[in-house]
Image: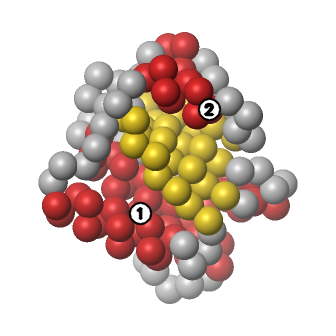
Amino acid sequence: MKIDVVCMGKLREKFFREAVEEYLTRLRRFVQVSVTEVDNPNKIERLLEGKDFIIILDEKGEEMDSFQFAELIRDLSLSKKNICFVVGGWEGLDDRIKRKANLVWSLSKLTFPYQMARLLLLEQTYRAFTIIKGIDYHK
């Protein structure tokens, strides 16, 4: 299994970059993961071509708790599906990109800045792997 995270915009604040790097380091113990930052929505469309399972983050998407998300990750892993998460920028994502999704997922009913959404996605993905592996992280 491989996880790609495609994000609109760059992380400018040092504290976000450091936190994202920390969770990427943690995640790489379980899975191959990459982050691609783009500055143009058309680049997102090209990056989605040929992806096995696309999950778009959107505030209007389906909500899951951490255990449900872990189950989704486990099921995709067992079926040997590679996952591509897409995190939009401050303007969100165009509907033509959303239509490519296998799943539109909401982290919360709350609205987060796109930098925070990226960090929360990585933390929740790490949490999912610790749940799957039975590692004492999720309380």
The image quadrant of residue 70 is bottom right
Q: Nearer the viewer, mark 2 or mark 1?
A: 2
Q: Residue 104 or 100: which is nearer the viewer?
A: 100
Whole-percent x and y of residue 121? Answer: 43, 53
Q: Which residue is drawn at 50% across and 48% down?
A: 5
Quadrant the N terminus occupies: bottom right
- Where does label 1 land, which residue? 123
Amino acid bearing label 1:
Glu
For marks 2 and 1 on the same chain, the one whose residue lies earlier in the sequence = 2
Which labelled disc corresponds to residue 48? Answer: 2
29 or 66: nearer the viewer: 29
* Spot occupied by residue 86 in the image (x, y as percentages of width and height): 49, 38
Q: Toward which corner of the image does residue 73 lie, by quadrant?
A: bottom right
Q: Quadrant of residue 21?
A: bottom left
Spot occupied by residue 122 in the image (x, y as percentages of width and height): 44, 59
Of the numbered discs in the image, which one, if any, rests on residue 109? none
Q: Where is residue 41 in the image (x, y as percent from the top left)?
A: 43, 23
Residue 127 visible in the displayed image: no
Q: Compared to 57, does 60 lie above or below?
A: above
